[in-house]
Amino acid sequence: MYDFKFADIGEGIHEGKILEWKFKVGDQVNEGDTLVIVETDKVNAELPSPVSGKVVKLGKNEGEMINVGETVVIIDDGTGKEVEQTPTEQKPEETVEEDDGGATVIGEIEVSSDIIESSTENNLPKATSRKKALATPVARNLAKKLGLNINEITGTGPQGRVLKEDIENHANQTKTSAGSFSLPDVEISQAGDVTVVDISSVRKTISNAMTRSKTIIPETILFADVVVDDLVELRNRTKTLASEKGVSLTYLAFISKAVLIALKEFPIMNSSFDHNNNQIIYKNFINLGFAVDTPNGLLVPNIKNADRLGILKIAENIKTLAERAINRTIQLDEIQNGTFTITNFGSVGVPYGAPVINHPEVAILGIGRINKQAIVVNDEIKIGHVLPLSFAVDHRIIDGADAGRFLNRVKELLHKPDLLMLGWYDEKIWFSYCW
């Protein structure tokens, strides 16, 4: 018999609701078949069968809640013995670093017609191996929630396995350590005419992620404006061609391409910092994240290996991922393992903001609304399109000068968008190239 349990699937997901069973008791299933759809605060997860066999028992009925560690289904796989470990659960010997959603918003950048008054590394070091903790999924979840490095905690379970109790004891002993962001108890008066509402699980996840980021990361933020007249003209000239291919060509796609080029030239911006081991972990891939403002809270899907895509494919991926996030059809792997995030304040008409870094990333770019305002060109005052940018970096490993050079490179690419296509100036050739 195979006892298939609801595993720790990460992203702060501790429970779910059985939304739809695809099989019933007595049915024959094959390994990989979707057994059930579980609704969570972040995704509707399809759970595949880990083995082939006959369904003997359903752990929960449709509409019921299921918690991590509880039985999803029991399958007679012909082995005659019970197996507790499932392929979707973290294996004890694996150490998985997971990303939480950051506070960013995705949407179409607004271009205002109002006029605003003018105002007065190639060979990269590889991280060495480190001790990998044996731990239960519940313990891993709790350690992540408390901002603790589970590899540094001594386990008291069988073979040194780290248990939930070990995490709690360690947290009580190290409340003031750098990895912990436990907040002091604060009494807030509820006197008078008030309404008290419990926050949702996804809001708890966002709260924990923001607290972790602001507690661990000493960020510095740089602000800049870039004149994007040529970018506006290029986008207006090519968006009809893009729509003929069924693609909505947004400014965000161009900005993303500029960021991807700059990340190749400044790889430390695409890294993570392991402060427990004093190591910089360079990512030799770029999974470009964008947060989506959904009815259920902010999600940050990311485009895998985005640096391999042209502008139109990037635009296509942005639209597809945003729609999936809003419709709650996003897959878990599409919101995991991001390496750099862009947040779009311009989607709600805001010019500037101070973005919060999406830990364990080390940088985030905020983009505002494009406005028409007075600019100086060759000592003459003219009206131009100006895009505000705000760039936050982890000051532990990134100096302000390096952040400035990265931001200036992004500005250059957006000011002269032909650079994004490396010299393909003919519109038809350019359109084919960037696809």
Image (cartoon, helix red, strand yellow):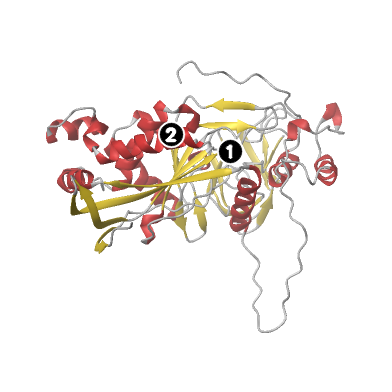
Position of residue 239 measured from the top left corner of the image (x, y, whole percent) = 19, 47
Observer-nearest of 398 and 120: 120
The relative height of residue 375 versus residue 49 in the rendered view (above or below) is: below
Q: Residue at x 66, y 74 (%)?
A: 196
- Which image quarter: residue 409? top left
- Which image quarter: residue 435? top left
Assign a secondary structure to mark 2.
loop
Q: Amino acid at mark 1?
A: Pro
Assign a secondary structure to mark 1.
loop
Observer-nearest of 269 and 95: 269
Label 2, label 1: how far apart the Cα atoms are? 17 Å
Asked if residue 31 can be seen in this view, the reply is no
Position of residue 283 measured from the top left corner of the image (x, y, whole percent) = 51, 27
Q: Amino acid at mark 2?
A: Lys
Q: Which residue is mark 2?
A: 304
Observer-nearest of 24 and 172: 172
Q: Which residue is mark 1?
A: 360
Dot 2 crowding, Cα within 10 Å, few <14, some 14–19, many 20+: many
- Asked whether, in this view, residue 36 is left or right of residue 196, the answer is left
- Asked whether, in this view, residue 174 is left or right of residue 402, the answer is right
